[in-house]
Each structure stands twice: as structure tokens, then as C-alpha cells.
Image: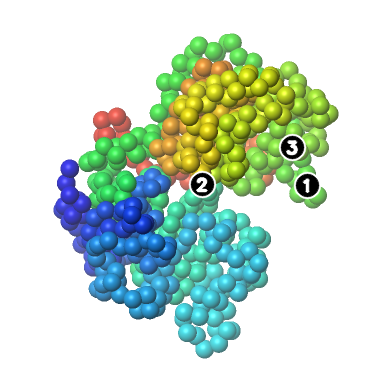
Amino acid sequence: MATQHELAHSAPDAATSETLLGVEGLSVAYGDQQVVSDVSFTLGRGESLALIGESGSGKTTIARTVLRLLPKGARILGGRMDFDGREIAGISDRAFRPLRGAQLGFVPQDPGNALNPVRTIGVQAHETARLLKLKSRGEERERILETFAEVGLPDPKRIYRSHPHELSGGMLQRVLIGLAVMPRPSLIVADEPTSGLDVTIQKVVLDLFEELKRSLGLSLLFITHDLAIAAERADHLVVLKDGVVQEHGPSKSVFANPKSDYTRELQADVPAINPNRYRSIHLARNTAERNALGSQIEVRSVSKTFGDVVAVDDVSFAVQRGKTHALVGESGSGKTTTVRLLLGLEHADGGEIVVGDGVVNGHSRSQWRSVRRHLQLVYQNPFTSLDPTWRVGRIVREPLDRFGVGDKDERRERVAEAIRSVGLPEEMIARKPANLSGGQRQRVAIARALVMRPEVLVLDEPTSALDVTVQAEIIDLLFRLQSELGLTYLFVSHDLSLVRQLADTVSVLHDGRVVEQGTVEKIFANPENPYTQALLQAIPAVPRVDQSRRVLDPAPV
């Protein structure tokens, strides 16, 4: 394998434009642990480069090193960083501080945590506007409003007066982008700028970056684990694993001829690149069970309002036993409310919900407990859904305790059985969540749902917080469990690429109504509703790669 310097400096995309950022031989450690080793790359003016890798690959550490935002205890072991012709790794914090914000902009990952919830957007925007050294607060306000309009925010004056909780995730992300571009920096570092956003909002945000790059001549350094976004949007890629560069080059070259096994593994795990990864499983199941299935879930003309807001309006769909049905739509589409109605966490204003042979809505609490034993939920985020003070054994056992299932020995055996079924060693039972990886935590969450031996699992964005390779492992696990246990899945997601891989049928929700539904194959191949068409057109248009790594035509949506 070539050295990192050879990968960086012999790449076929050696910068044809003037270099804005040059990183050479960078190594970084946290305490005694080295997390970045001999990393080198260049970024030209007006170009975009994506740092790709799983959690722990070093990509965020590299970005924070460029911004001089490393946490206490971190240190640069060696290497050089040049920005706009100036070496910045060795200069003092006092000398670097004027560059941050003014010349080096930053868009953090989570807009909900990046903005102060008790202060208005305008108050926080003025902190950035002070970098412009304008004559008055009035001039600052005018520049803020102009910037909000520039990044496509509707009614900038209302945005200025609003608190963060009054804006959607997409609006908050645009606010952060606006704050980053207001001083007209030469480089913007964007750390997972679209994670957690709906697919259409993701496209809007990425289109905005492209437009700002063209109109303002910005350079962009993306940090992402989403190879599909990087392939579609970045000019160049740097693929990282365990702090070491695995590959470096133009996006098209990396996809056409990946040099490292790791890059090929990443390609294989990206749903947008390999939409038919599980096609043989679906075909085999459809052939074997075409005439043997009945409905496990039926939602019939269900409606729900909250005050004057109609959250769910006459929603109907059915899920066959042993199959996977997906609910898709943007935030506010009604999919979460529909799931809460199914789980008995909300009561429908009208309509009927049937799970197995029992009607869910209208049940007393004791009747509902009987239904709930056969209907379990896997939450979205494994980092927040598990009690950090409990050990895995207690987390998995809790449903058995609540429902009074079996004696102590039987519960212990069922916990061990559930842990084994999700591919974890029994020694994990004694650990706490803090000692588990994200993938291991989600396996524990699935084991907790399985310990009651349910017939139905409701999967609420079960992989959205996970790296692409871990996501693929969890999806493989879900397919195996469905085959072995005959489980029925209701899959809630805004990731349409993943829906295409995982689901058999799909309902598309918009403003609380089902606008289109049918088999995944039919909906994705020939969407009839304009809203469905817009959702599918927002999927990253990346090359599809076959098993020989030969680039094929872009995957149809």
C-alpha cells in the first residue's frame, strides 16, 4: 500500500487551481492515543473536498485541528497546515483567532445544539456580525437580514425575531450556514451538515452550498460518513480509517477505481449506491409466501387532531405478516403520530387500528397491555434510548419485569437468548451502554424489543444515528431475525435509499395524508404523485457499483 504522502501527492487530481488549504503529514493525539497519523491533502480555491470515514476515523479531529478547536488534552504531534499561503499549525492562538470566523467559517453538525435556546436568532447573529466591524447595530441588522435572504430563509425579519425552537431543522441549518458565510470567509468547514435532515431539506441545504461556492468562490471542507452525498457533491475525497488515509483523489476516480479494500466496503454498504442489495431476499420471500400471508397490521381511516392542527387525516394501510412496510415523509408528514397511535401512546379521533386479531384503539389500559406484549418499538437513537446507569442485562430484562413474565431463572435465560439472537456475546450482559459502540447499543435495543417474543417490531429510524457500515450490519441482522422469527416490521424513515433496500411495501405521507402507496418496486419505478416524485428526485444521484467495482449508470429513482 502506498504511503500517505504518495497517496496525497501522486493523486491524478493534483490541484489545478490555487491551493487554499494544504495539510501535510498531520498527526494528532488525545493524551497517549494517536488518532490521526500522517494525513496529507490539498484543497484549491473554489473547490470542495470531503473527509469520509466511520466514527473514530479521525475526520472530525482533522477538521477541528484546521479550525484550532481541539479539546483540552489533544495535541499536534507533527505535520504542517498552510492556509492562504500562511502556516497556521504553529502560530499562537492569539495570531490565529482573527482568522476563525472571518476567513475560516464553521457549520456544526447539530443546529439544535449549536444555537442558544433562550436567545433569539437575531441576538446570536449579531455576535457574528461584529466581525464585519460595521458602524452601527442597525447596519449589522441589515447585513444579517440580507444574509438570511441570501441563504433562502423566508421572511428574514421573522427569523431574526425567532427563538431556535420556533424554526424547523432545515431553517436552523440555513441560519448556521448564513452565520458562517456572513463574513465572506475563504473556507467553510461543514461537519455532517445534513445528518438528521429530511431528504428534500438535505438537497436544499446541499444545493445552497453549491450556489454559495459558485457565487462567492468559497472552498468547502465536508466532514461526512455519507459516501453517497460525498460522491454527488464533493470534487475530491479523502477516505480515512483509524486516522490513516486509505485513498485520496477526485470523486469520480475514487468511485470508478477504488484502490483500497476499505473504500470498496464503504461502497458496498451505501444504500443509494447499491439499491438492490437485498433484492434476492425479497424475490425469494415473495415467491414462497405469495399466497400464504394475511394482514398483521391494519390501519383503517384513522384521523388525529391536536387543537386546530390535523396531524393524521384518514390514513389507511395494511402490513402483511412477515413483511416490512415503510412509512415515509418529511417532518410534519404525520408518520410519527401514526406510529404513536399504533403503539397506543395517542388515541385516534376516528378510525380503527388492528394488530393481529385485536383492535388497538379503544382498549382499556389492561387490554392494551395484552396487545403491547406482541408489539415492540426500537427507538431511533441508541445513544439516548438506553439508560446509562443500567447494565445491559437489566435493560433487556426490563420488559419481562414489567409484564411479570416467568421466574428469575426463566428471565435470565430469555435475556441470554435475546442477546445471542442479535449476535452479541453473553459477556455484554454485564456491561453498561457507555462501554458499547453505537452498533452494539442498537443491537441491545433490538434484543430488548425481542425479549418479549413479539410478532411486530416498529422500527423508528433505527439506523439514522449509525455509520453506513454499522447500518448495513443492523439491516443484515433485521433481515435474519425476520426470516428466523417470522417478524413483521413497520419501518419509519426519511432515508428513501434505505427504504428501497429494506421494505416490501411503502406508504408516502404528506400533511397527514397518504398520497401514494404500493410495493416499493412500483413506487420507486413509477411514482405518480408529485410529492413522491420530489422525494425520490432528492436521493443523491451517485454511480451504482457492481460487485466487480465497475461503475454502472446512475441508479434510477
Q: In this view, does 477 lie to the left or right of 39?
A: right
Task: Name the kind of residue labelled 2 in the image.
Answer: Val
Label 3: which residue? 345
Task: Name the kind of residue labelled 3 in the image.
Answer: Leu
Disc on res. 199: 2
Residue 432 sits in which quadrant?
top right
Q: Which of marks 1 and 2 is nearer the N terminus?
A: 2
Could one spot residue 38 in this view of the protein? yes
Q: Residue at the location (30% across, 75% down)? A: 91
Check contact, mark 3 vs mark 1: CB within 8 A.
no
Q: Residue at the location (51% across, 44% down)? A: 434
Query: In the figure, 383 relative to 45: above or below?
Result: above
Residue 528 sits in which quadrant?
top right
Q: Please state which of residues 63 and 121 is positioned toward the viewer in this rendering.
A: 63
Q: Is mark 3 on a helix, strand or loop?
A: loop
Q: Residue at the location (50% across, 69% down)? A: 179
Q: Is mark 1 on a helix, strand or loop?
A: strand
Q: How far apart are marks 3 and 1 (CA)?
A: 14 Å
Residue 81 sits in which quadrant?
bottom left
Point out residue 49 in the picture as x, y percentages from the top left corner.
Answer: 32, 56
Point out residue 362 in the picture as x, y percentages from the top left corner.
Answer: 82, 29
Query: Within 10 angstroms of label 2, few (less than 14), some, or many (20 or more) residues?
Result: many
